[in-house]
Image (cartoon, coloured by chain):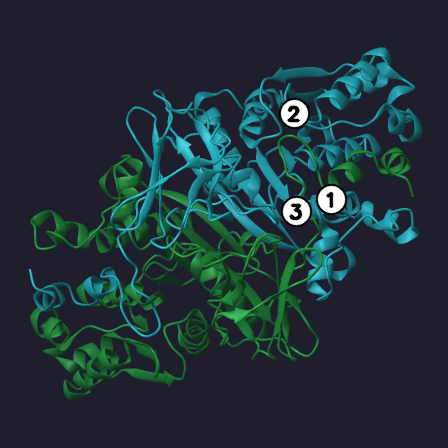
Chain colours: A green, B cyan
Amino acid sequence: MKLKAIIRLFGLFAILAIPKIGRSQPPRGPFVVSPKVNPDKTVTFSYLAPNASTVLLGGGQFGAVDVPMTKNAEGVWSVTFGPIKPDIYPYSFKVDGVTVMDPANVNFFPNERFKGSLVEIPSDSPAIYALRNVPHGAVTYEYYPSVEGSTGTIVVYTPPGYNKETSKKYPVYYLISGTTDTEETFWKVGKTNLMLDNMIAEGIAKPMIVVMPYGNPAARIAEQKSLSKPTDIVNRDSEDAVRRAKFFETDLITNIIPYTDKNYRTLANRDNRAIGGFSRGGGQTLRAAFNNVDKFAYVCSYASYISPAEMDKNFTNITANPDKTNKDFKLLFSGIGTEDFLYKGTVEWETYLKEKKINYKSYVTDGGHTWMNVKKYLNETLPLLFK
Amino acid sequence: MKLKAIIRLFGLFAILAIPKIGRSQPPRGPFVVSPKVNPDKTVTFSYLAPNASTVLLGGGQFGAVDVPMTKNAEGVWSVTFGPIKPDIYPYSFKVDGVTVMDPANVNFFPNERFKGSLVEIPSDSPAIYALRNVPHGAVTYEYYPSVEGSTGTIVVYTPPGYNKETSKKYPVYYLISGTTDTEETFWKVGKTNLMLDNMIAEGIAKPMIVVMPYGNPAARIAEQKSLSKPTDIVNRDSEDAVRRAKFFETDLITNIIPYTDKNYRTLANRDNRAIGGFSRGGGQTLRAAFNNVDKFAYVCSYASYISPAEMDKNFTNITANPDKTNKDFKLLFSGIGTEDFLYKGTVEWETYLKEKKINYKSYVTDGGHTWMNVKKYLNETLPLLFK
């Protein structure tokens, strides 16, 4: 079929589907499909680079470390890797030593530093975090008045049917992502929304609202004031640094929770409020919970801890009266992977809690400091909340 | 201050802020701030690559084409460019010939093919698309039952105060992004939500709901069935290809609009329904509007057109009775840049409309097929809707 005939039939739709060749855009070359998940759970990764000398599959948290890729006659490099254990993994390419995302893949890892793409290998029976044919909740981005006159962003999951009711109220889980993650990471990588959709459909978890804040308001303030971001730990003992280190907690307690309670139909009391987080967000979780026992009844640390020294210094309110603490916290969860670089510290913290007769639920899995593990922690904890 | 003392004082928070050196993660090197917008509206771009031979600033739609960057002693390449005219622009780096996003910048361009970062150069008085201190609407991601048993995604802007009322109903603008863009592009790049927040605060635009669909449901169906994406235009004249070419319109009319009217407080009639789109989305806009005159009263084409040949073949319903058409469409908008590669075709289409005595509002600006221009088209059209 000739180009003119195509254009006559389909007009602009066809024109725009044809690789554009023109002054402003270079030829696109062959249309690359990547990643391509094969029925045997191997994955074929491809990258167009006719002039590159080496292309490696890198950063693949499924065991792919600098796997050589092969170039075809059209200049497309590819490799088939696996079979890979079903999960969602980040990966990237190393092109002549330069790390890049997969340009053919729209699913990226929201992060302030590294730029990775995501691949999902489906399991034979759909995983608890998979998109299934069940009623879906919604995910809403909200602006709110944050600390220091800045405008903050939260991402809010509301359960299926939230919009169709006008009076039903829900418990709230405040869920904080890790260092260099953003307020998007817990849904775009952690799939918290799809897990809850599925768990609610199965009756495993209670319908709840999940509020996902951004963990580093100091950076956002700097950005909005067009200043540099805080770059290092110099002067962390200054008065200003101490105040800034508390920004997140201040923001959560004085801004985010009141904003949520005002704008969503929440059950606004401690028995219906949970807090959890991964990595830095786990540390923020524990400090916020221990400093505000009146605010949270469920506390989930995902790959994080507080050192015994800091516990002794700052949180004797938690350890002085274990009976009260054990009554206050309906859940104190600590999840960690044996290969996590924070494993040792977490074990020390749990040992400390045990000595102080503080109840906690320990969940130890294999794997490292990864979002594959975060989904396991979510899978353990979401069913325990608000019950 | 010693590391141990820092850890004692700040615990994990400090540990996690320190560049990690360990088995699983290479040293991070110096903390790079990029882009850095300077008070004189120059921008300093930086990229860490101690071992690269050349790093260029590329893809910068502010006039930066392969601008050489310079390496400092720490291995950070940087260049200060500008001053740059206030706007939001995509850019990337070319590292030894390999195009990469800016790893230090969390603001990326949502796209299925190219991977670009975004920089905003603020103007002296805040632009209409800037984050201002006004009441903000919310942006919600929804799953809905789409064509062929697939699950679709729409992004929905609701105006300030939407959640606080329970009965007020709103008009709806269906807004479709371009080829390889996603349902995220109109808010993350086009800033439609912030423009409406500002325009509503100033009383320039009516409070409205905006529904942003994904323009290529065929690709999503393939993805969810774990098939390859449609890769080319072979067999576009087959029955199946014709059906697939109509997927978007079918999805919009039979799924997206009913879903929106069911789940949001909409004024569900043609006088309160607008449709618009950019590039491929503009073509989809015009075809959907001309095929469904009973559904839409406001029609906005941003850098798109229908060829006279296709008009004559498929849309005599529009041209046969211009008086009726001119009454039906309260707005038929055509915006185009003089450097846009679709400029000539757009002029031909407008000439054709004039000959057929169809009223339209033409808006010609400088610039090309860019999202900087999309914001100009939004700026022209949003105040005209539903009035």
What numbered label is drawn on residue B214? 3
What numbered label is drawn on residue B252? 1
Going by the image, does A126 lie left or right of B239? left
The nearer-to-camera label among 3 and 1 is: 3
The nearer-to-camera label among 2 and 3 is: 2
Q: Quadrant of residue A148?
A: top left
Q: Which one is nearer the viewer's eye here, B113 or B376?
A: B113
- Label 3 crowding class (10 Å Cα cut-off): few <14, some 14-19, many 20+? many
Tag 2, which secondary structure? loop
Tag 1, which secondary structure? helix
Tag 3, which secondary structure? loop
* Residue A169 visible somewhere in the drawing: no
Residue in view at x 74 percent, y 22 percent? B346
Q: Is residue A226 above or below residue B24?
A: above
Q: Indicate which disc, 2 or 1, sits on the residue closer to the N terminus.
A: 1
Under mark 3, the amino acid is: Tyr
The nearer-to-camera label among 2 and 1 is: 2
